[in-house]
Image: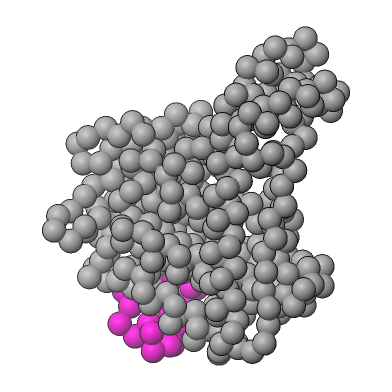
C-alpha cells in the first residue's frame, strides 16, 4: 500500500509539469543521470518539511524562466485521504493548503508525514565542514519538532537582518532591534541540538556495538550563554566589535559538533571508509529516531547511495529502512536484488519533463 499515492509538480526544478501515481510502498525511479529523478525526491521532501535537502535558496527550486512553482500530493492517512498543496514564488512567498483549508502556520502543514533522505553528499556530515553537521541536526530536529523549525527560522531571519544593519555604521540601533528575537531563540536551538546529539550518539553507539569494539561520541561546542538574558547582554557587549567585522561573531550559526571515534576526531583522523560508514550510521540513527518518535507515517528517500557499501552495511541499510511506511529510490537501472523484485518501477526519460 502506498503512503503517497499521487505527486504533481509544476515549474519545479526541471519539471514544467509532471504527475505520478504510486501504488506500492516501494517505488524506484530509474533513468539516466540528469533526467530529474533526484528532483522528484526533493519535491516529496519539500512537501514534508517545507525545506530542500539540496539548497537553502528557494529560487533554485523554480524552473528557469518561471515565477514560482507548485507541488501537490495525495496522502493515504489510513481512515481517510489528504491532499497537500503548496505554491511558492521566486521571491519566496509561500501559500499552503491541506484539502480546501489554507494553512497559515508552517508547523501545522508539516505534520502530515515525515521524510528521511539519504544522498551521496551525506558523507560530508562526518568529513566536511561544520555547516554540514549543523544542517544534519537542524533537518532532523525540524522533522520531529515544529517548534524547533519555527525557532530556527525566526533566529536566522533576525540574524540576517542584524548582519545587514551591522554593515551600516550608523545602524547600531537597528541592529539592536533584532537582538531580543535572537536571544529568545538561540538558547532553545542550543538545548535541542544538545539533546538530539545525545540521542544520535546513543543510537550510533548501539549499531557500532554490533560490529566490534568502537567507541563513538559527539561533543557539542557553543560559544555563547544558553540563557536569553545573558545572550542578549553578550550581543549588546559585542556589537561595537561586530560592527567593525560587519557580522555576528557568536551564535548557533557557528556551533560545532565533534564526532569522536575511539577518542580521535573523525574528520581529521578517520579513514575514508570510517567517514563513509559513520555518516551512514548517523543517517540510519536519524531514521530510527524519526520512526520511533513521529506519530505520522514516515517515507524514506534514497538517492543511489548503496553502490559504495559492502554487503554487511548494505544489508543493515535495507533492514533498517524496511520499517518505513513508503520507500522511494533512484537508480539508473532497476537493481537485481531480491528487495526490488516487487518494487514499482517508474522510468524517467531525459528531456521529457
Residue 110 versus residue 75: which sits nearer the camera?
Answer: 110
Q: Position of residue 289 (x, y in %)?
A: 45, 65
Residue 193 versus residue 326: which sits nearer the camera?
Answer: 193
Most common SS among magenta residues: loop
Q: Position of residue 333 (x, y in %)?
A: 47, 77
Q: Position of residue 12 (x, y in %)?
A: 44, 45
For residue 122, what is the image quadrant? bottom right
For residue 254, what is the image quadrant? top right
Q: Is residue 66 above or below residue 264?
A: above
- Give left or right: position of 54 versus 175: left
Residue 266 versus residue 322: which sits nearer the camera?
Answer: 266
Magenta segment boundaries in residue numbering: 329-353
Q: Residue at x 61, y 46 (%)?
A: 190
Query: Colour mode?
Result: one colour
Q: Residue at x 28, y 37 (%)?
A: 97
- Give left or right: position of 216 versus 345: right
- Give left or right: position of 121 versus 94: right
Q: Residue furthest left?
A: 79
Q: Is residue 56 above or below residue 266?
A: above
Amino acid at each position: 500500500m502506498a503512503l503517497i499515492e499521487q505527486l504533481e509538480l509544476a515549474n519545479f526544478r526541471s519539471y514544467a509539469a509532471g504527475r505520478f501515481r504510486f501504488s506500492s510502498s516501494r517505488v524506484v525511479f530509474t533513468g539516466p543521470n540528469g533526467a530529474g529523478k533526484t528532483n522528484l525526491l526533493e519535491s516529496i521532501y519539500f512537501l514534508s518539511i517545507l525545506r530542500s535537502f539540496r539548497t537553502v535558496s528557494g529560487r533554485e527550486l523554480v524552473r528557469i524562466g518561471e515565477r514560482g512553482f507548485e507541488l501537490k500530493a495525495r496522502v493515504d492517512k489510513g481512515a481517510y485521504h489528504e491532499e497537500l498543496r503548496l505554491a511558492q514564488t521566486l521571491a519566496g512567498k509561500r501559500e499552503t493548503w491541506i484539502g480546501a483549508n489554507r494553512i497559515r502556520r508552517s508547523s501545522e502543514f508539516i505534520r502530515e508525514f515525515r521524510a528521511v533522505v539519504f544522498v551521496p553528499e551525506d558523507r560530508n556530515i562526518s568529513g566536511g565542514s561544520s555547516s554540514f553537521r549543523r544542517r544534519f541536526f537542524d533537518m532532523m530536529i525540524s522533522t520531529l519538532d515544529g517548534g524547533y523549525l519555527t525557532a530556527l527560522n525566526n533566529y536566522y531571519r533576525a540574524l540576517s537582518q542584524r548582519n545587514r544593519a551591522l554593515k551600516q555604521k550608523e545602524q547600531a540601533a537597528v541592529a539592536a532591534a533584532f537582538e531580543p528575537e535572537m536571544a529568545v531563540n538561540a538558547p532553545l536551538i542550543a538545548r535541542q541540538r544538545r539533546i538530539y546529539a545525545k540521542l544520535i550518539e546513543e543510537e550510533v553507539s548501539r549499531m557500532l556495538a554490533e560490529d566490534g569494539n568502537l567507541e563513538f561520541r559527539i561533543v557539542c561546542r557553543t560559544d555563547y550563554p544558553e540563557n536569553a538574558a545573558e545572550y542578549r547582554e553578550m550581543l549588546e557587549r559585542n556589537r561595537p566589535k561586530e560592527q567593525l567585522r560587519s557580522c555576528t561573531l557568536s551564535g548557533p550559526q557557528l556551533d560545532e559538533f565533534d564526532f569522536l571515534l575511539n577518542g580521535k576526531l573523525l574528520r581529521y583522523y578517520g579513514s575514508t571508509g570510517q567517514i563513509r560508514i559513520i555518516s551512514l550510521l548517523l543517517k540510519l540513527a536519524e531514521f530510527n529516531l524519526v520512526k520511533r518518535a513521529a506519530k505520522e507515517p514516515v517515507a524514506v528517500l534514497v538517492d543511489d547511495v548503496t553502490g559504495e557499501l559492502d554487503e554487511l552495511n548494505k544489508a543493515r541499510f535495507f533492514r533498517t529502512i524496511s520499517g518505513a511506511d513508503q520507500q522511494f529510490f533512484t537508480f539508473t537501472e532497476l537493481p537485481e536484488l531480491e528487495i526490488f523484485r516487487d518494487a514499482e518501477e517508474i522510468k524517467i526519460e531525459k528531456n521529457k519533463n
